Image: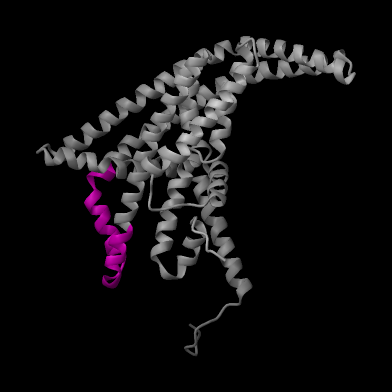
């Protein structure tokens, strides 16, 4: 309001500038404080998923604090067991990496030798590039895989904060819900209740379904690779299932890893083709049966924004951001859908295309 009592109207470029500056400051804060924010976001999402389990124990006349501790302990045991298995298998793979590089290079030498004769290219020039590439692969294998294991260890150390956050959030669940309601006026209470309820429902359905889907895909991948006799089949199957959680991009990386191992360890390159075919069949089963039935959700995000937000999450928070991006975007869309001025943005994020 101005001194004369009239409302101040800013021009469009001024509003746009303020919005862009605000977004820049907000994103900068998210990046700078990621070591605090990321564990807290994980804790909030995990708390929403675990809350029904806590209620289950409470209804069995178990003390609320004991119920929360028991739920967190059981969850931690499951996650720690899976993580320990993956790290042990990854350690074996890192030790065998130089051998895999040698086998892959030998196979590549044979292929290049045939191609050099066909295309009349000097084999010495090609072999020089191969030797250089082999040295780089060995360096990558020893350095990057080792760094990956160290990174996983540091992530585990950071995630040790998550159980503490989860306990506090679950313990003060009623207080936090009441706080959210008190932030809004009486006329908005029904809308706030609907948003909170649907947010909890969406996260629970999405993440529980995602866990079940990942378990099924891990079993299918592992069985398929074991049937083909691919080394490190279980590790590659689990990694493929975890990567499959990342929309669109994860599936490409998931099939590339076992194909590379197949090329490096098998006498025939056809095994890599077999892996590609089997993974394609598994993807068809996943997309047409598993996802619609198990990972069904009220909130649908279109492919364009799913890919954009995954890359943005990776740029902002790394691997953690890639996994958190879709659930957070689903929550944002849900909020947009319940606020009248923001409904067009919720429509834009959705996958409902108008017929023209």
At horizontal 66% and vertical 14% (from top left) the residue drawn is 101
Residue 175 on the magenta span: yes
Give above or below for 164 relative to 23: above
Q: Image quadrant for the C terminus?
A: bottom right
Lateral position of residue 131 relative to residue 210, left or right:
right
Work out whether residue 51 or residue 223 is closer to the camera in this orientation and state it: 223
Type of secondary structure dominating the magenta stretch: helix
Q: Residue extending furthest left?
A: 61
Give percent across and percent down for residue 66: 17, 35
- Is residue 69 shown in magenta? no
Residue in view at x 43 percent, y 47 percent: 327
- Dividing the picture into quarters, in which one does residue 181 lie? bottom left
**Closest to the observer: 130 or 88?**
130
| Magenta region, residue range | 168-195
Taking the image as shown, residue 199 lies to the left or right of residue 313, namely: left
Task: Note whether residue 45 is visible.
Answer: yes
- Please indicate, yes or no, whether residue 142 appears anywhere in the rendered image: no
Q: Quadrant of residue 191?
A: bottom left
Q: Residue at x 26, y 29 (%)?
A: 73
Q: Which percent across, then down, holds residue 288?
A: 46, 40
Q: Is residue 92 above or below residue 9?
A: above
Q: Where is residue 187, by image quadrant?
A: bottom left
Q: Position of residue 143 (x, y in %)?
A: 61, 20
Q: Residue at x 54, y 34 (%)?
A: 251
Q: Residue 240, image x and y in percent?
A: 50, 28
Number of dots carrying numbers:
0
**Residue farthest along the bottom direction in this orientation:** 4
Give the image's coloring scheme: one colour
- Comparing 207 with 181, the one in front is 207
Depth check, front residue: 49 or 186: 49
């Amino acid at each position: 309001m101005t001194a004369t009592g009239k409302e101040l109207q800013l021009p469009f470029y001024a509003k746009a500038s303020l919005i862009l500056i605000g977004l820049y400051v907000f994103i900068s804060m998210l990046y700078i404080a990621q070591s605090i924010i990321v564990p807290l976001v994980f804790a909030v999402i995990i708390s929403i998923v675990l809350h029904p389990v806590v209620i289950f124990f409470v209804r069995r006349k178990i003390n609320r604090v004991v119920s929360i501790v028991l739920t967190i302990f059981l969850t931690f045991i499951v996650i720690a067991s899976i993580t320990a298995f993956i790290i042990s298998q990854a350690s074996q793979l890192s030790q065998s990496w130089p051998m895999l590089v040698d086998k892959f290079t030998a196979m590549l030498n044979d292929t290049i030798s045939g191609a050099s004769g066909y295309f009349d290219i000097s084999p010495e020039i090609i072999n020089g590039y191969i030797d250089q590439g082999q040295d780089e692969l060995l360096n990558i294998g020893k350095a990057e895989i080792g760094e990956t294991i160290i990174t996983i260890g540091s992530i585990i150390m950071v995630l040790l904060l998550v159980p503490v956050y989860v306990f506090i959030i679950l313990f003060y669940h009623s207080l936090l819900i009441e706080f959210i309601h008190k932030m809004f006026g009486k006329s908005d209470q029904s809308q706030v209740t609907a948003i909170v309820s649907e947010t909890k429902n969406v996260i629970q359905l999405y993440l529980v379904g995602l866990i079940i889907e990942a378990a099924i895909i891990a079993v299918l991948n592992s069985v398929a690779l074991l049937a083909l006799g691919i080394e490190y089949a279980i590790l590659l199957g689990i990694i493929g299932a975890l990567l499959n959680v990342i929309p669109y991009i994860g599936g490409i990386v998931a099939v590339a890893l076992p194909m590379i191992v197949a090329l490096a360890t098998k006498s025939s390159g056809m095994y890599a083709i077999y892996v590609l075919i089997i993974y394609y069949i598994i993807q068809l089963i996943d997309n047409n049966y598993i996802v619609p039935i198990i990972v069904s959700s009220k909130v649908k995000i279109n492919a364009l924004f799913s890919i954009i937000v995954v890359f943005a999450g990776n740029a902002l928070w790394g691997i953690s951001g890639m996994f958190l991006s879709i659930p957070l975007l689903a929550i944002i869309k849900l909020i947009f859908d319940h606020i009248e001025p923001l409904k067009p943005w919720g429509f834009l994020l959705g996958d409902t295309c108008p017929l023209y």
